[in-house]
Amino acid sequence: MKLNQQNLGALPTAIDVPAYALERRRQGIAHIGVGGFHRAHQAVYTEALFNAGLDSLDWGICGIGLRPEDRAVRDALAAQDYLYSLVQLSDAPNNPVRVVGAVGAMLLAEESAQAVIDTLADPAIRIVSLTITEGGYCLDDSSGEFNAELAPIQHDIAHPEAPVSVFGFLLAALAKRRDQGLPGFTLMSCDNLPHNGAVARKALLAFAERVNPALAVWIAEQVSFPNAMVDRITPMTSVAHKAELSRRHGLEDAWPVVCEPFMQWVLEDNFINGRPAWERVGVQFTDDVTPYEAMKIKLLNGSHLALTYLGVLRGHRFVHQTMADPLFVAYVREFMDQDVTPQLAPVPGIDLEAYKVQLIERFSNRAIADQLERVCSDGSSKLPKFILPTLERLIEEGRPLDRVALVVAAWALHLKGVDEQGQGFAVVDPRADYCQGLVADEAQLVERVLGAREILGTQVQHPAFVAAFERSLRSLRQRGVEGTLAALVGARR
């Protein structure tokens, strides 16, 4: 049975469907970057509110796609009245399936840039949320400053009336709001970035100051930028996922979402123009998200990277495959316990030991089959945010650097695109050509990788880290991943 609004009433009773009248849903949120994570996280919290009758239906979501590849998502969703199924994957015998209706429309910039601007400027839209990836904020990783030299940004500075970048669209919409005497909106980042709201604010204001300084002043007063910590492992939807949904439930969904049962959202209560009552469905509001951010980014995201490049080199393709190897488990647990945990401040309401045990269980979830390709993608943006802060503290405190150096060394060898079995794989990164050029010449690999300041900054040139990096490279080449981990874990026991 094809998923659409007409067929909702005929779906199997095992599938939960919206408990509210879809025709009463109205748009109050515009979300830029409608991918799997948004549909498994923010949209699900909003759906839970609607289903429980705990808030008005004024917070429906209008998706916005600014990239050509967003057309496939839009077309798939539009053909089924923007409904989609969410499947939680675990080792439980019956994984729950839910149809989500919180996303009611999706616009494409390539079809009508003006329609996107008009929607963002509509006074009904009080929150604009973002999942545009770590690299989407146009900040230089080495300096932390806005990179105005990027081609889309240069285009939008010269042609603010015909934007192509996310910041160009936001600025055009905010200019229209100001000119019409309308209030601003809350710009809510849902990306995995430390202080993601502050990052969004810095990027948007830096762009605005180059285009219209007076508008930048207005934005600083009329737009709020809450920081948030978001968490839910959401692998890429595969053909097998769609086929299993059809086999088990007789449901034809062009683009379902699969995810783990766990989800978390810690959010600063900094909304300038109202917000949904998300706290009634599990969102934790706080005055300071910093300790939660540090915990998640350093422990979960950092550990993910510690596993992923080594796993790919070893020949694995899924996260749970790495966790089936006791050497990987021992390594990542030592990384968590000895390198990261001593750097963390107390996290209100969180038992860090229990959190780490839970992370190991989540990484080991075979049913979710989280792809290493997904986790290691965009490494040139993820390493500076998820690994380098830990490295910097280790250097400052004079602590051992071998485990964190191994992450960077594995990333460098991963850029060659060949694993230990001689099997090739794709290097997924917007800067893939540049990054692969760093490792093209074996004789200059160390110098070129550690000299890539725009990615790795300057701390990697500390003599102790250079020595640890060279040891890791040498060990990976001579002993392979298994031998390297055995020596490293054994040396610490």
Image: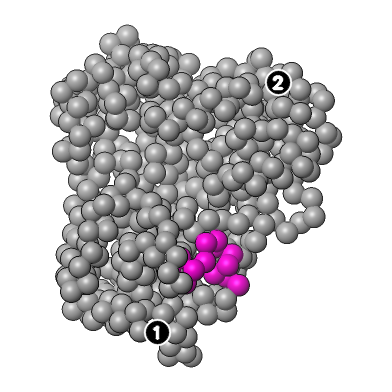
Tell me what residue is drawn at x 42 percent, y 49 percent.
192
Q: Could you tell me residue 348's position as x and y percent?
A: 52, 58
Q: How far, Cα to Cα, is label 2 from label 1? A: 57 Å
Task: Locate residue 452 relative to residue 296 in the image: left or right.
Answer: left
In this view, the mark in front (2 or 1): 1
* Up-down relation of residue 395 to residue 9 (above or below): below
Mainly helix, strand or loop, the magenta region? helix
For the residues labelled 2 and 1, say whether their Cβ atoms are less than 8 Å apart: no
Toward which corner of the image does residue 423 lie, by quadrant? Answer: bottom left
Tell me what residue is drawn at x 53 percent, y 56 percent.
371
Q: Could you tell me residue 330's position as x and y percent?
A: 52, 79
Q: Which residues are magenta?
A: 312-324
* Up-down relation of residue 301 to residue 147 (above or below): below
Q: Is residue 20 magenta?
A: no
Tell me what residue is drawn at x 65 percent, y 45 percent.
241
Residue 322, can we see it?
yes
Residue ranking furthest to the front: 422
The label on residue 5 is 2
Toward which corner of the image does residue 480 lie, by quadrant? Answer: bottom left
Residue designated by label 1: 479
Q: For mark 1, does the 10 Å Cα neighbourhood hold few (<14), some (14 to 19), or many (20 or more) residues?
A: some
Residue 462, can we see it?
no
Tell me what residue is drawn at x 43 percent, y 73 percent.
420
